[in-house]
Amino acid sequence: MKPLILCRTGHEDMALRLAPLLDAEHGDVETRRFPDGETYVRIASPVKGRRIVLVTSLDRPDDKLLPLLFLAAGARDLGAADVGLVAPYLPYMRQDKRFREGEAVTSTCFAQIISRWVDWLVTVDPHLHRRSSLSEIYTIPATSLHATPLISTWIKTHVSAPVLVGPDSESSQWVAAVARDAGAPYIVLEKTRRGDRDVSIHVPDLDSWVDHTPVLVDDIISSGRTMVETVRGLIAIGMKRPVCIGVHGVFAGNAYRELVESGPQEVITCNTVPHPSNGIDLSDLIAGGVRRTMNAVQQGH
Ligand code: R5P
């Protein structure tokens, strides 16, 4: 029996790409809101005995989580062999410690909820800053894939004389890896974040790089302030207009428009969150990760 891919209406982009790559069927799911705001979920394809692959982007997760859990619970209840989750963007990874007294460490709680309802997880470049692996918080087999080789290939084929720029120390892991694969130099700047949208970037003298095209690389573009302030800082010291690359283009509120208006040549993201800036397709990478994870789960690893 072929695996069955399930996703909610409006979230089909990655699911439709993965179905042929995984030799899987695309199932029918019906979801809607009752008048009182509660969620109705119905899986209209046969589930019994089948391996289920739930596919969803989990940006803006709060509204997506409950329908996802109902879908997973429903599939289990209907006799699925196992239920996996492909969440190319994994949210709630940044509140990974109690920064201020009394805060909830939401990354741990979110991981516990997901681990309770699905049997395995595949994601791309989760924000592992203070943690080294998803297994520190997820109790199910969890595969982290890396977009860096595909970002490097994009840079090699689209940008001449790049100098990669990481806006802060947290981005240094991406920048170093992308730079190595792209055969390009890189620099890491210093960021000070005073609030959700209050960010400043210290851009040092970069005279020796004025003939290069700065390529900003970061894992997440959320409020966009990190990228906006970096673009402005680079342009202010006379650098060429940068290219901005984010793995996950979450773009909260007006972030995309504000970033475009700050003056970069181009804004490119991977298709972990559906967005017009998606220029790097990760479906082959994700399909490979799903195949390996499903095989490992089947073999009991
Ligand atoms: C920070 O640790 C991350 O690597 C990103 O730099 C950050 O999440 C970007 O957030 P924003 O777009 O809100 O500045």
Image (cartoon, rainbow, N blue to C red):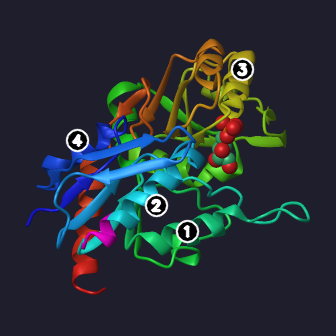
Instruction: Compute the Cα span from label 2 to label 1.
Output: 9 Å
Across and down, in percent, residue 45 comes to 18, 54
Residue drawn at point x = 70 percent, y = 34 percent: 226
The disc placed on residue 69 is: 2
**Marked residue nearer the N-terminal end (1 or 4):** 4
Is 226 one of the magenta-colored residues?
no
In the rendered structure, which amino acid carries the disc numbered 4? Leu
Helix, strand or loop at label 1? It is helix
Across and down, in percent, residue 151 comes to 40, 41
According to the picture, the residue beneath numbered tag 3 turns out to be 232
Instruction: Compute the Cα span from label 3 to label 2.
Output: 42 Å
Task: Locate ligand 1 by image quadrant.
Answer: top right
Q: Camera-side residue: 130 or 180?
A: 130
Instruction: Compute the Cα span from label 3 to label 1.
Output: 40 Å
Residue at the front extreme, as displayed: 35
Mark 4, Cα crowd under 10 Å, few <14 / some 14-19 / many 20+, is: some
Mark 2, Cα crowd under 10 Å, few <14 / some 14-19 / many 20+, is: some
According to the picture, the residue beneath numbered tag 4 turns out to be 16
According to the picture, the residue beneath numbered tag 1 turns out to be 113
**Marked residue nearer the N-terminal end (3 or 1):** 1
Helix, strand or loop at label 4? It is helix
In the rendered structure, which amino acid carries the disc numbered 3? Arg
**Marked residue nearer the N-terminal end (4 or 2):** 4
- Magenta residues? 75-79
